[in-house]
Amino acid sequence: MYNLKYNLIILEEIMKKFGLIGNPLGHSFSPLIHKYLFEAKGLEATYELLETTSSKLESRISDLRLKKYDGYNVTIPYKIEIMKYLDEISDEAKEIGSVNTICVKNGKVIGYNTDYYGFKRELEYYKIETTNKDAYVLGTGGASKAISKALKDMKANVKLVSRHPVANMIGYEDLKNTNLDLIVNTTPVGMYPNVLASALDVEVASKAKCIVDIIFNPVRTKLMSYNKNSYNGLLMLIFQAAEAEDIWLDRVYDIDYDKIISKVRGDIGE
């Protein structure tokens, strides 16, 4: 009995514990993705959904300082708000203006942005052309900032699209008479459970040469159904998750991503 109790204590100390902060989180595939990533690396680790209100964000960071968790991901709607509770913010997250990955290093709580990396990797994986292409990013939240930077770094001509446009943005009506090489939806419109909603009508969406909707649940959104050359955000989620783990664990792992992608797709019925 003593040996069993001792072994359980040792296992708890060895096992890493991570979580996702956001609200709502019922749609998330992140635990499934991290499970397969942990298995591929031979790691003993858990990943929890930590549905959180705005008033509890600071206490979540306190839990990290107290080593109750080894790292967090952050999703809608807290990628910007969470930044004020951090000790340091990485250069790429500062430039983007949002954080989606957090851990403690040398006693400091540091925020990073791996959405940039994840989106870029998805475009490369699908061989979506960006150089000198007109790319329209729907939405102006935390994810849109990372995606806009990725597109600019991939030499696309980027325009932000907003229902309330300000300087250097355009409105949705402006898309009707525009060359649409690429549309990227970063809004939650169409996300489960509101699966019948679309960020664009069929008239605009159908004339785009390519659409990437970073929503991943459902795997085929209403917006995607309007355009044959369309992709969801599942690969972005997988690649950003892998980058987040490299940051948490301070190590780069060489794993077979095609195998991970295949497993996740099989489980979610894509």
Image (tube, rainbow, N blue to C red):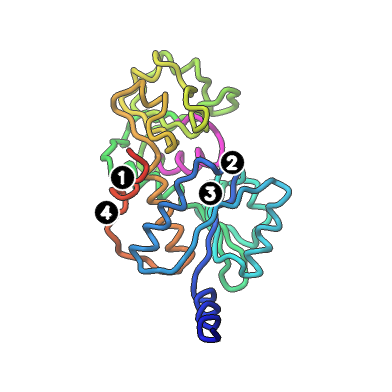
Q: How many marks on residues?
A: 4
Q: Which residue is mark 3?
A: 95
Specify the quadrant that holds the C terminus. Answer: top left
Which residue sits at x=51%, y=86%?
3
- Residue 99 painted magenta: no
* Cα distance in 3D space between marks 3 and 2: 27 Å
- Which of marks 4 and 1 precedes in the sequence? 4
Kindly state the secondary structure of the residue where label 1 is placed. helix
> Dots 3 and 2: beta carbons under 8 Å?
no
State the residue at coordinates (65%, 58%).
86
Instruction: Look at discs 3 and 4 and give the one toward the viewer.
Output: 4
Q: Is residue 186 left or right of residue 40?
A: right
- Identify residue type, mark 4: Lys
Q: CA distance from mark 4 to mark 2?
A: 29 Å
Magenta-tinted stretch: 137-151
Residue in the picture at 28% in, 36% down:
129
Location of mark 1 (residue): 266
Q: Is residue 139 magenta?
A: yes
Look at mark 2 in the image and give the residue it sits on.
24
Residue labelled with disc 4: 259
Residue flagged by tag 2: what amino acid is it? Pro
Q: Earlier in the sequence, mark 4 or mark 2?
A: 2
Question: Is 63 displayed left or right of 268 in the figure?
Answer: right
Frontmost residue, 18 versus 235 = 18
Cβ atoms at labels 1 and 4 below 8 Å apart: no
The image shows residue 252 at horizontal and vertical percentages of: 37, 66
Mark 1–mark 4 Cα distance, whole angstroms, equals: 11 Å
Kind of residue at disc 3: Glu
Badge 2: residue crowd in 10 Å (few <14, some 14–19, many ≥20): some
CA distance for labels 1 and 3 = 36 Å
Badge 3 marks a residue whose secondary structure is helix
Under circle 4, the secondary element is helix
